[in-house]
Amino acid sequence: MDSLQSLPPLSTLSTSVSSALNADLGTNHDLTQAPSIVAEFLTQCDDLERNLVHLNRTLESNLASYASFSNRIGHLFGIVNSKLTDLGSSVCLGSSVSDGEGLGEELPSLAKEVARVEAVRAYAVVVFQYAKKGREKVEQLLLESTTSYPIICDNLKKIYPARDGNPAKIAVRGLSLALPRGECFGMFGPNGGGKTSLINMMIGLTKPTSGTAYLQGLDILTSMDTIYTSMGVCPQHDLLWETLTGREHLLFYGRLKNLKGSALNQAVEGSLKSVNLFHGGVADKHAGKYSGGMKWRLSVAISLIGDPKVVFMDEPSTGLDPASRNSLWSVVKQAKRDRAIILTTHSMEEAEVLCDRLGIFVDGALRCIGNAKELKGRYGGSYIFTITTYSNNEEEVENMVQHLSPNANKIYRISGTQKFEMPKQEVRIADVFQAVENAKSRFTVFAWGSADTTLEDVFIKVARGAQAVNILS
């Protein structure tokens, strides 16, 4: 669909479904037409899902319409559940209906589809709320012309055109975001989610399809040459010249930041010391002779030369050994005090150590934002139970977990290792210990553990929710 106007009239849909239910599931309980009604409703459910996905992707221009749309869907679900209740059934709450009533398997199927569409609607509403809050904040800041937010994204969008028979790719879906000075904002998400595309627009490598961003109050569409002098970038892959020394790299980039004379020399020396490349003659060796960790440290020093107030770091610790990584983290924590930093990472540990706020970026959109504690609280409420046995004991483990926690959710199973999410309200840790000890008398348990929700668990849950919406679309 190309526009909101092309959506089907949901008020008509609600009326038609209500009339059909009243006609065929009325007071006389004539259920002979139930299968056809269910089939029609399933078709309508599919339409609703497609429309939800479409609206979710065009939130920035359809906020009011989206809210109205969501309310009408809720009304439609109310009609269906009311009729199920009138029939003396509570299928949606897990009960069943006998074949003798004429519905056979269709009514449970209907309830399942209603629940499926409702789950999509609930997920879309959450994303809608994040988009709305971000949009309102950006609009307020643009009116105030404030400089306390060095990074402001205003409905930033990137679409790569169709090519070689492949459809157009929406890399960034109308992002609105504001970052204050002194904050390191972490973005993590699956590969291809749009993180690097977002950074490439903001550093001037690619142009936005629509929208813009303001760095230090300057528009990236019209003032990129000026922005370059007050911006630092640490790319995903180093951009070093093998025949230049570390010192020569910093002298070159320092001059690009308008540093000269003694100020330039002091800045270079300070940068080399901050990343432990100053002593032992390392600064005057060719970059081609540096180890991978040394190259990354030099790239970080380049991004911070000239005291830029806006810094972008794209997976800066990838491939570093633990010692080099910890050294890098110390530099970033020191640097963020008077800067706004956007950092992308696949390391949950790095995200927790460095970032004041985190955003999970999936399919071109931020699906949630908050600090690590907030995200764990919002998507947690569960124990994560992991156990490793022989592969032929996996079914016994599943039965044990289901007995402990009927609503447990299996996260993964790999060669005898299984990971489950168990709601805290229905399981006690003492019971888990007892169950595992009892299980050891029946089969071999190589290792097991129970922990609170981690950032990795939050990421998996949010990413799966986004993928479910994409599959339904």
Image (cartoon, rainbow, N blue to C red):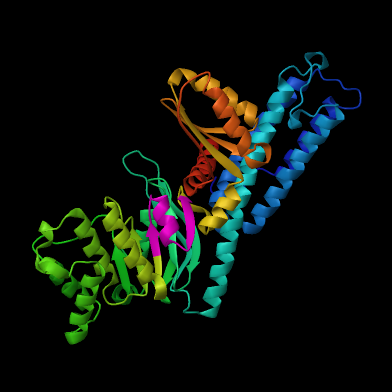
The residue lying furthest to the bottom in this view is 262
Q: Nearer the viewer, residue 148 or 274?
A: 274
Q: How many marks?
A: 0
Q: Nearer the viewer, residue 446 or 227?
A: 446
What residue sits 18% from the left and 86% below the top?
262
Q: Is residue 434 visible?
A: yes
Q: Nearer the viewer, residue 318 or 252?
A: 318
Magenta-tinted stretch: 342-361
Provide residue 351's location: percent of width, then percent of height.
42, 56
What residue sits 61% from the left and 56% below the top?
129
Q: Is residue 401 left or right of residue 77?
A: left
- Is the residue 424 above or below the residue 219 in the image? above
- Is the residue 24 above or below the residue 167 in the image? above
- Is the residue 401 above or below the residue 8 in the image? above
For the N terminus, which image quadrant? Answer: top right
Q: Quadrant of residue 19?
A: top right
Q: Is residue 156 left or right of residue 86?
A: left
Provide residue 409's location: percent of width, then percent of height.
57, 33
The residue lying furthest to the top in this view is 100
Q: Is residue 395 left or right of residue 262?
A: right
Question: Would you say residue 263 sits in the magenta stretch?
Answer: no
Provide residue 38's location: percent of width, then percent of height.
72, 26
Provide residue 340's location: percent of width, then percent of height.
41, 70
Q: Is residue 207 visible?
A: no
What residue sits 88% from the left and 27% below the top?
26
Question: Would you say residue 360 sits in the magenta stretch?
Answer: yes
- Is the residue 467 above or below the residue 36 in the image? below
The residue lying furthest to the right in this view is 27
